[in-house]
Image (spheres, rainbow, N blue to C red):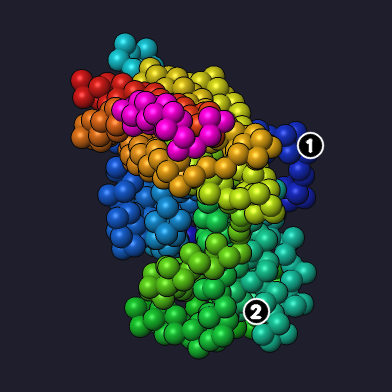
Amino acid sequence: MDRLTHRLIRFFTFTPHDMSYSFLDLLCLLGSVALFLYGMKVMSEGLQKATGDRLRNILSAMTRNRFTGMLTGIIITALIQSSSASTVMVVSFVNAGLMSLAQSMAVIFGANVGTTFTAWIIALFGFKVDTSAFILPIIACAVPLLFATASRKKSIGEFLIGFALMFMGLDMISDYVPDLQSNPEMFAFLERYASMGFGSVILFLLVGMAITAIIQSSAATFAIVLIMCTKGWISFDLACAVVLGSNIGTTITPLLASMSGNVAAKRTAMGHLLFNLFGIVWTLAIFYPFVRLNVHITEWLGQGNPDSIFTYVNNLEASDPALYNSIFDGSLPAGHPVLAQIARMQFSVSFGLSMFHTVFNMVNVVIMIWLTGFYVKVVEKLISSKHTGDEEFQLKFISGGLMSASELNIAQAEKEIVVYAQRVQRMIAMAQNIVHTNQGNDFTKQFSRIEKYEEISDRMEIEIANYLNRCSEGRLSNEGKHRIAAMLRIVSEIESIADCCYGVAKILIRKQESHVDFNEEISRNIDSMFIAIEAAMTNMLRLLRHFETAEQADIITSYNQEREINNLRNQLRLANVENINEHHYEYQAGIYYMDIIGSLEKVGDYIINVVDEVKDQFRKNAV
């Protein structure tokens, strides 16, 4: 009890100097945030360079179902004692396409339970694990690794440096925010709003939200609430309302981190916010019975009634104002029985608030874990893509932002290239359809559509190539540099496929202007070439989806398909000369027909060029 009494006296020792907050403090706060973001960036890069594709496999194993994902979130948050840090990392992984939205939701659910671990440490032992104590030893271990000859050891060193800088930034942020915890008089005016019934509950919920959003520390919010209870300003009910609001305040950091991310990252951060919002809605519906439940649990565990401090302090203020004032100006000796009594009640309040926080999050997770699918749909509905149509320019995975890391960007770009290839594959079907479309509005619409797709293809090639070039300027492993070079060549080949499909449409425009018609035989032969091209494109997409783990059988299939396309082109070319001589169709029709066949054969060449790049990657992985 002596330690708690000492802390109580220290908390309530207040001087006007504590209120000073200079411009230099503001700059230090901004620098702390920058250090946190830079540390997170270095940590992500080092982790990616050290683990490569193994990280994706690890994350998949950790989140293979909602329950293992939830357990992962609990363990990580309990270890690093920061739900903000753990959810920011989840947002960055979703932004990189390493985790799905559903997987991230389960981890976030668990992070909310894991954050209660810190509250229990404070309640039971009166201290929080000082992460700053581990920062310098971590850096001491990391720096020698930076000078190692093995690239993997260097990457591990970078990861450890980034990890230390991230937590150093978090620690410094709490040091340089306005010191609300040591200045409880800032909240004295709230006392007059503590007797408005349920309106006070809503007000203090908003206060808890604002305090935690500013100081980004639920532990500090707990300390402030403890002060307000000890002074008799608020009852235990309103203290629980403040803690309830603090659950919303902790979502601010992931929301800020997601602002520079893609749609998936924004949805993940929004999911974190909605999880707590939904929880608050059902808690407010049964607020007073739920608080009473936690009071009874605290009493049953022998920790006293958390409500008693409010009555005790207010009665003391009314009966003996001088003694009441002496408690908080530090004039009472440390062993005074009143201070000891208040310290015991203070511990009861701390225990009760920790119990309230834990039961709230546990019940919330038990409810929400079964509604993950519905939850994902709600988030996707609230944050939709800027353009929902297939015919709008849109990059799905890649983005630029402070939380991006070069190796993570490569994984994003790989997924974006698959989306790009899928879009270009649609142009093959469009080109086939326009072959069978006669003159008129339908032909004009089909041509305009394929022309628009070709423009989108050009823009996507430029965006992805620029993105990959920016990645190459970052800190990459040798493997990462080779992958970027291969991906740049792949993007160029895919764009050439789009050009060929558009070229088929332009050939048909010339055919229309010449008033030439294709007979059934020509149309049937062109269809056979389209079928062969479509099969080759589908197999190419299969290889792109597994760029680093391509199957040898799929590579062999692609080469066989390329030979079939070349053989078919040669057969049709020879047959064309005979058909013209035998007057199956006009000479001019045969010219346009062979131009289309030639363009489609080029598509096969570009497809096999992509396969060659994948094959080279396959050989490197096989070595």
- Residue type of the residue flagged with mark 1: Phe
Mark 2, other Cα within 10 Å: few <14 / some 14–19 / many ≥20: many
Q: Which residue is drawn at 61% across and 77% down?
A: 238
- How would you rate the neighbour count of disc 1 (Cα within 10 Å): few for under 14, some for 14-19, many for 20 or more? few
At x 50%, y 88%, the residue is: 289
Q: How far from the left and from the top, in percent, is residue 615?
A: 30, 25
Return the x and y of residue 320 as percentages of the image width and height: 68, 79
Q: Mark 2 points at which residue?
A: 201
Instruction: List x then y, in percent, for residue 157.
Output: 38, 23
Name the secondary structure under disc 2: helix
Q: Does the magenta stretch include residue 132?
A: no
Q: Give the range drawn in magenta.
A: 565-588
Q: Nearer the viewer, residue 239 or 339?
A: 239
Q: Eyeballing the image, is 400 above or below 139? A: below
The secondary structure making up most of the magenta span is helix
Labelled disc at residue 23: 1
Residue 99 in view of the camera: yes
Q: In this view, does 441 lie above or below 336?
A: above
Marks 2 and 1, the one that precedes in the sequence: 1
* Callout 2 amino acid: Val
Q: Quadrant of the C terminus?
A: top left
